[in-house]
Amino acid sequence: MLPLDEPSLDGAVADTAAVVDVTTAVDATPAVDGVASLPLQTDPTGGGILAFLVTFVLLSAFYAVTLHLAATFFIGDVPSQRAAYVGPVPAVVSILLGRYGVESVGFVSPSLGVAVVVVATLGANALAISRSYRISAVPTVALTALHFAFAAVLGFALNNIFGFV
């Protein structure tokens, strides 16, 4: 191997220094218990239509599963297809309002924006539950609240297990 400062390399010293800078930048990532960690993704909101579709499908499945659990607890034995019909409604409302609803209104604070997204998602969820399960207003409100509770508990548990945020 040739020494780095050999004159016959014609600029290879500068190239080698750039490579060393890149490797030290990678090695300088924060370490947890002595193990270097690399980020899995640079921007969690970027990725285009594929990221939107995957998020939509996963969130729809999550809402459908938690709604089916809540409906089975509240109503009794119900077909799971009814929950599958409802799942995409709160998913699309929460994704679109979470991404575009709060940013477009300048006077809304982030905490108020979160409240607006939650209320709109619960309202859309209640309308879809009422239509899918064919129940009146009082049981719809109760099932929507129970669904919100099931989704919150399971969401917090999954977040603690996988560390999404």
Image (tube, grey):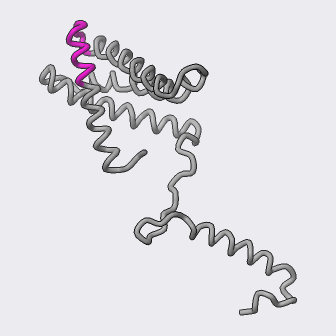
Magenta stretch encompasses residue 118: no
Range of the magenta residues? Answer: 133-146
Confirm whether the magenta stretch covers residue 135. Answer: yes
Please state the horizontal and vertical placement of residue 162, each as a whole percent of the image: 35, 50
Going by the image, does 12 lie left or right of 42?
right
Looking at the picture, how far across and down is residue 72, in whole percent?
A: 16, 26
The answer to which quarter of the image holds residue 61 is top left
Image position of 120 (left or right of 141): right
Kindly identify the residue that appears in the image at 74 percent across and 72 percent down.
18
Q: Residue at x 24, y 10 (%)?
A: 134
Judge by depth and name the residue closer to the eye, 159 or 81.
159
Instruction: Determine the image quadrant of residue 45.
Output: top right
Farthest residue in the left direction?
76
Task: State whether residue 133 is above or below residue 100.
Answer: above
Kindly identify the residue that appears in the image at 80 percent across and 80 percent down.
Answer: 12
Of 64 and 31, the residue lying toward us: 31
> Count the marks: how many?
0
Side of 106 where 94 appears, left or right: left
Quadrant placement of the C terminus: top left
By secondary structure, the bulk of the magenta-drawn segment is best described as: helix
